[in-house]
Image: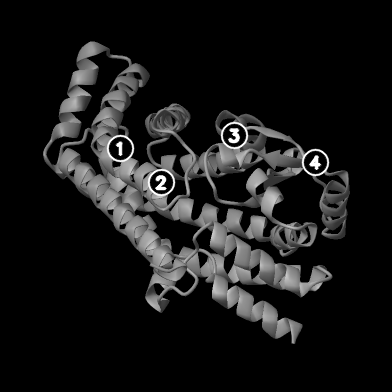
Amino acid sequence: MDEAQRAKAYHRAGRVLAVVGFALDLALIIFLLFAGWTIGLRNFAYGLTSHSALALLIYLILFGLIFQLPGIPVSYLKDYRLEHRYGLSNLTLWNWIKDELKGLAVGGTLGLLGAELIYWTMRTWPATWWIISGTAFIAFFVLLANLAPVLLFPIFFKFKPVEDESLTERLLELSRRAGTRVRGVFEWKLSEKSKKANAALVGLGNTRRIILSDTLLEKFSADEVEAVLAHEFGHHVRHHVFRLIIVQALSTYIGFYLANACLLKWGPSLGFRGVADFANLPLLILVSMVLSLLLLPCVNSHSRWLERQADDYALKMIPSKSAFITSMEKLADINLAERQPSAWIEFLFHSHPSIDKRIAYARSTAE
């Protein structure tokens, strides 16, 4: 099997497992909602305490166990077995389990806080809860983008300043030309977990920084690293972060509005005791899942458009377009990218234009 066939097989298997995981989650939510289990969990929680917030906490813990446990085999196949089968992972099984537990702890904590906030607003402002909760979630997304590099990323990865001073200065100069300040250039110890290579401009405001995977630093020339980061700075120059915040805000408000409408329409027939009855959580999740599925092609199309703009900026800012082309070639090889996906696969699933399209565009501008 040649590299192109290996890449297609790898991505095909990943998509199949992702669809299976989504279908399993959807089936569990529907079962919890229509089999009456969610009401049974609510009654059990209130049987232990009459305090609404504590009852919700008990419900969420039980709900989380029921919802997460059946998906463990799919997660194992997709995130561990598949990555090892195609030689892309450096994780041992125990380290993968530790990362999963860390992710569960972080995600679970954020989920608990988010749910407590939503149902507190429902109890306090039952008519306008969806506006208040939506606004709070958007503010939280922005705050999380600011804090993630200093609070969340270090939980999963190690970072240290890049030792190559000339490369650091070169990238800082690139940031100055882009009109943004960064807190530094950091080496990201990705090789402890993966053979893939990556780089990013992360954080907002006082936490913004450049991170370069050690796999990238090992295999890419300084010109190629600059080309990769020029693309990332293109997102800043073209105000893509602001655009994405607007898109996120709109989708958040639409999601909460539809959730409220569904609760008002079908809540009584499903046995819920008003909007603030946390037994309706599966219905809220169901609305979110269906909306995310319907919006996926639009979100990915918008993302591909932003990525093309970032490529265009990078090609104008770097001295050598050949460095952009070779960096794309190396990323495709190291990350086992699907270079020529079918049109419908790219339309539905890809947030970036295919590697071959990006290379062809770079060559056309060079000519």
User: Considering depth in this image, is 352 or 294 the residue closer to the camera?
Assistant: 352
For badge 4, the amino acid type reads Gly
Which of the two labelled residues, at mark 1 and mark 2, occupies the earlier sequence position?
2
| Residue receiving disc 1 | 275
Q: Which residue is mark 2?
A: 84
Mark 3: amino acid: Phe
Cα–Cα gap, marks 4 and 1: 47 Å
For this rendering, which residue is in front, 360 or 94? 94
The extreme bottom residue here reads 367
Residue 157: mark:
3
* First of labels 3, 4 by sequence position: 3
Among the 4 quarters of the image, the one containing residue 268: top left
- Please give left or right for residue 150 compared with residue 29 in the image: right
Per the rendering, the mark at residue 184 is 4
Rounded to the nearest angstrom, the CA distance separating label 3 from label 4 is 17 Å
Check disc 4: other Cα within 10 Å, few if <14, some if 14-19, many if 20+. Answer: some
